[in-house]
Image (spheres, rainbow, N blue to C red):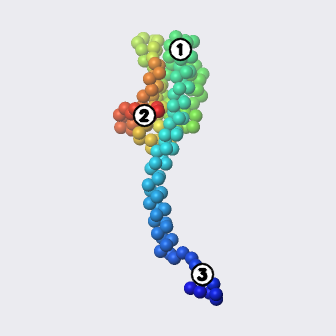
Amino acid sequence: MKFGDRKIAGFTIIEMLIVLVIMGILAAAVLPTYQSSVSKARRADGKSALLDLGARSEKFFAQNSTYTTEISGGSGLNLGRTTSSDGYYNLSIAACGGGTIARCYQITAAATGAQSGDTECSQLRLDNVGRKTSLNSSGGATEYCWK
């Protein structure tokens, strides 16, 4: 189309639709990879919470000759909460051993909230000998969550 001596150029609706379809295909291909990267980055919140609780547990054991299952209270590990610092994991601790003296523990960080979609590493665990394990959402062991 000409307007006077100037030619008016622009995009047709078909060209715009083609661009939108291409952008949609690219977004659909990239989104799962992005979500996986975000979940992996959020695992650092759970890992740091477990390592912190592990250190607190060892300090408690050095002072009391037993482990505790009290995470948040002042008579236990004194964390002040039962979630990780960013809130992506719920924390729990289980003591083991015979009698009244707990001789070992296992701390679990279970994915919650925005992190609950992380089916590959839904639980991170740490025990008193420093063993780092993890479970997927089906309860199967996974090897790569701590890497």
Q: State which tag comes first along the sequence, 3 or 2.
A: 3
Along the line of sight, the residue nearer the viewer: 38 or 135: 38
Question: Which amino acid, mark 3?
Answer: Ile
Q: Disc 1 versus disc 3: distance between alpha carbons?
A: 80 Å
Quick check: 9 above or below 60? below
Q: Disc 1 versus disc 2: distance between alpha carbons?
A: 30 Å
**Which residue in the protein does label 1 denote?**
61
**Which residue in the protein does label 2 denote?**
144
**Which residue in the protein does label 3 denote?**
8
Of the two numbered discs 1 and 2 in the rendering, the one whose residue sits closer to the viewer: 2
Q: Report x, y in % for residue 13.
A: 50, 75
Q: Which residue is found at the position 62% from the left and 87% from the top?
A: 3
Q: Report x, y in % for residue 39.
A: 49, 42
Q: Report x, y in % for residue 130.
A: 47, 21
Q: Secondary structure at mark 1?
A: helix
Q: Residues within 10 Å of mark 3 (few under 14, many from 20)?
A: few
Question: Which amino acid, mark 1?
Answer: Phe
Along the line of sight, the residue nearer the viewer: 137 or 97: 137
Q: Which residue is found at the position 46% from the left and 32% from the top?
A: 146
Q: Residues within 10 Å of mark 2 (few under 14, many from 20)?
A: few
Q: Secondary structure at mark 2?
A: loop
Quick check: 147 above or below 2? above
Q: Which residue is found at the position 46% from the left and 15% from the top?
A: 102
Q: Secondary structure at mark 3?
A: loop
Q: Residues within 10 Å of mark 1 (few under 14, many from 20)?
A: some
Q: Disc 3 versus disc 2: distance between alpha carbons?
A: 58 Å
Question: Which amino acid, mark 2?
Answer: Tyr
